[in-house]
Image: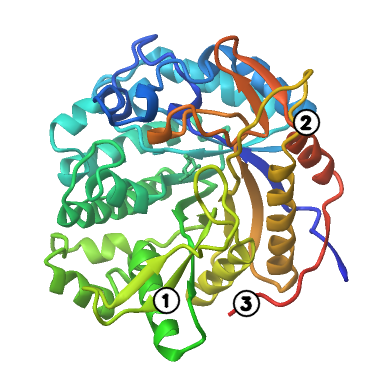
Amino acid sequence: MAKFSFPSEFRWGVATAAAQIEGAWNEDGKGLSIWDVFSRRPGAVANGDTPSVACDHYHRWPEDVELMKTLGIRHYRLSLSWPRLFPDGRGVHEERGFRYYRSLLEALVKAGIRPLVTLYHWDLPQSLQDEGGWLVRSTVEAYAQYATACFEAFGDLVDDWVTFNEPWVVSQMGHSTGQHAPGMRNTAFAYQVLYHLQLAHAKAKLSYQALGGKGRVGWVVNHAAFRPATASAADREAAAKVDEIGFFLYLDPFFKGEYRPEAAHYLKAKGWMPQGETGDGAILQQGCDFIGLNYYSDLMVSADPTSQDEVKVFQDPDAPKTTMGWTIWPQGLAQILRKGSVRYPKVPWIVTENGSAWNDTVEQGAVHDSARVDYLKSHLAWLGRAVSEGLPVEGYYSWSLLDNYEWAYGYAQRFGLVHVDYPTQKRTVKDSGLWYSQFIKNPVIELPSAIPE
Ligand code: FCB
């Protein structure tokens, strides 16, 4: 097998999100987020877990920055909590919130760790939700003001910004299936929300340009690798259809100013076409300076004339799974990067999340998470394949630095390279964290065979 060395400028990082690690849910003037409220709804989150304390990172961040430094990590993707900065979503800002992020970002930069900052990782201020949340256009304006305030306050420390994390999850799980905050169940709402997120991204990007920002503004999609169940033309067509609706729909407007005709036709036929205003097309067409990809798993697709959408999406029953119940198919990482680069030529990609949950336990001060090490190794090998083929991929951020609040799964699912004992808040670097720390010093992989079609 041929060996491949990642280029020296390739970014190796770790990722987290504010609501999942900070805790301090009602300290220093922070307003409520939709997750503070939703998690208290009976039955909404496993075990009734709330993000109130999480990893207590709000108080322990110096220790966590030090930990990253010790592990040799030079890139960190974090998110800002909107209600910590604007408790009511707009209007009066909370100085203590701004001071907190300023200290954290300064400490990161001083430690030689470059921040990649997500403005929205799901924690909408509850007061904006009370006005209709992402269903109403006024939230787009509130977001644009919030984003502008962050660009102004932290622009000297941050050069790569992400406007939104996983719009698919925000729109579909938040508004169609109801598994996530704010817990709505109306698919037409979900697509209206998506449209508003896309508009909000574009408005933030315009504002960044108007401020003369020297960095970049990107958007992060999540996508499962949709694999045709057989090589038949019908199954391949079915998988391509799922890619259109579940993936490209989330990116196309930035490059075309509108949804593609096939996607628009589908949304209209379902009665899910979102409402916009004249002139939106020109605003939407702002592009993305980079696209972030969060990749975890794959799904099989077959043509199914009996089902409403004429496709069936299912898990391979024989595939290995993590404790989240997600199947493992590392080839998918390379496959999606290739598909995406074909569709949007010349746009750089960053793998902004990838990781796996396992039942980790601390034994004599160590966590032997060999399954996570295997997951990492196999995904990095396929990432290497993608980079070796010249696909424009700039970096990889492992999800996650720490075990943390896994949304509707609460604290039961552990994704960290570092174990967190919640009662004592003790951090223990897992074997995977030690392995990653070594790997990024000399990132060489054995190249796997060709990327599957
Ligand atoms: C992604 C989220 C991230 C984390 C991982 C496991 O969908 O962006 O916050 O929960 O899944």
- Amino acid carrying label 3: it is Pro
Sort mark 3 into few (<14), some (14-19) or many (20+) by Cα contacts within 10 Å.
Answer: few
Q: Mark 1 points at which residue?
A: 239
Please determine whether, in this image, residue 326 is positioned above or below residue 230.
Answer: above
The secondary structure type at the circle numbered 1 is helix
Mark 2 or mark 1, whichever is nearer to me: 1
Please determine whether, in this image, residue 207 is positioned above or below residue 57.
Answer: below
Please tell me which of labels 1 and 3 falls first in the chain.
1
Please tell me which of labels 3 and 2 falls first in the chain.
2
- Indicate how the structure is coloured in the image: rainbow
The secondary structure type at the circle numbered 2 is helix
Residue 206 visible here? no
Q: Where is residue 89 in the image (x, y as percent from the top left)?
A: 26, 28
Residue 123 placement: quadrant: top left
Q: Name the residue under label 2.
A: 71
Please determine whether, in this image, residue 87 is positioned above or below residue 367.
Answer: above
Q: How far apart are marks 3 and 2 (CA)?
A: 34 Å
Residue at image location 47% in from the left, 89% down from the top? 232
Front residue (pair 120, 45): 45
Q: Distance between the residues labelled 1 and 3?
A: 14 Å
Q: Where is residue 26 in the image (x, y as percent from the top left)?
A: 35, 12
Q: Position of residue 145 (x, y in %)?
A: 29, 36
Residue 147 placement: quadrant: top left
Please determine whether, in this image, residue 285 is positioned above or below residue 141.
Answer: below
Numbered label attached to residue 452: 3
Sort mark 2 into few (<14), some (14-19) or many (20+) by Cα contacts within 10 Å.
Answer: some
Image quadrant in which the N terminus is located: bottom right
- Amino acid carrying label 1: it is Ala
Image quadrant in which the C terminus is located: bottom right
- Amino acid carrying label 2: it is Leu
